[in-house]
Structure formats: structure tokens, C-alpha cells
Image: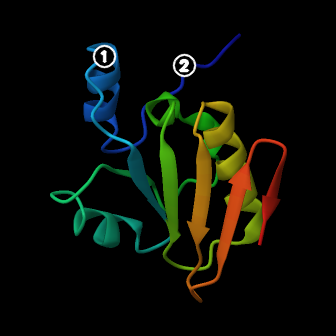
């Protein structure tokens, strides 16, 4: 039996834009880690933001369709670990993100594209 996936926090507006085919958005910010709520909320009025809740280590439980056709910039707020970053990036790419760039706590960066990634 397929489990119904839930929308990630703050993504409802993005899904509404897509449904109305009026998506003026080209890039989305996703925050994860223990400070995800605090950091994400500071950007809410500036650009589209989505949160992977700090208590979730299963990005596959969410419907990431809101990233289809968009560039994604992920901010790791607390060194969540490379495995979670890889799983989230995979889910985002499978949902149709054009590229996933990840900024780590130490300001390192990784870029994920279909077919491979760069660090």
C-alpha cells in the first residue's frame, strides 16, 4: 500500500502556483538541520522557502513536487551529515529540480545534477 506523502512545511504556496500554471519562481531555498525553522523563517518574506523539519531524517516521506523545473539551494544549518544530504538531493532531482546546490555549515558546497554530483 502506498503511503500518501505530505507537503513539506511552507510549500503549499508553491504547489498552488504550479496548479494555476502561474509559477513566477525560478529558485527555491530549502533549510534542514536543527536551526532550519529559525533560518528559514528569516527568508520567508524574501523568497520561496521550504523546510525539511529537524526531526525528520526521511526526505522520501515528503512530496517534493514543488521543486519541478526549479533550481534548489539547500542550506544545512547544523551539519546533518552527507547521507541525509544525498537522500534529500536524490528526492529533489527525482521530483524534477533542475539542479540542487547545497551549502554546508562550514560553507563548503556540493552541486547535484541528474547523473552525478560535484563537491
Residue 21 screen position, x and y as percent: 31, 16
Quarter of the figure with the N terminus? top right
- Under tag 1, what secondary structure? loop
Q: Is residue 86 above or below residue 110?
A: above
Q: Is residue 89 left or right of residue 64?
A: right
Local crowd size for mark 1, using a 10 Å CA cut-off: few (<14), some (14–19), many (≥20): few
Residue 111: give x, y in percent of width and height. Answer: 68, 62
Residue located beneath label 1 in the image:
21
Q: Quadrant of residue 61?
A: top right
**Looking at the image, which residue is at 32% across and 40% down?**
25
Q: Say which residue appears at 69% left-offset and 69% top-offset.
A: 110
Please name the residue that numbered disc 2 is placed on.
Answer: 4
The image quadrant where one finds the C terminus is: bottom right
Label 2 packing within 10 angstroms: few (<14), some (14-19), many (20+): few
- Residue 85 picture location, percent across and down: 68, 61
Which residue is rendered at x = 48% and y = 40% of the image?
Answer: 70
Residue 18, located in which quarter of the rendered image?
top left
Query: Is there a contact, CB below 8 Å, between mark 2 and mark 1?
Result: no
Amino acid at each position: 500500500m502506498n503511503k500518501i506523502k505530505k507537503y513539506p512545511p511552507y510549500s503549499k504556496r508553491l504547489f498552488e502556483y504550479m496548479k494555476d500554471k502561474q509559477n513566477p519562481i525560478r529558485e527555491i531555498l530549502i533549510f534542514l538541520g536543527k536551526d532550519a525553522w529559525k533560518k528559514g523563517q528569516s527568508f520567508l518574506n524574501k523568497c520561496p522557502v521550504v523546510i525539511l523539519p529537524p526531526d525528520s531524517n526521511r526526505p522520501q516521506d515528503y512530496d517534493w513536487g514543488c521543486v519541478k523545473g526549479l533550481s534548489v539551494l539547500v542550506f544545512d544549518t547544523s551539519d546533518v551529515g552527507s547521507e541525509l544530504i544525498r537522500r534529500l538531493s536524490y528526492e529533489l532531482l527525482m521530483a524534477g529540480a533542475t539542479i540542487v546546490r547545497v551549502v554546508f555549515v562550514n560553507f563548503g558546497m556540493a552541486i547535484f545534477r541528474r547523473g552525478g554530483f560535484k563537491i
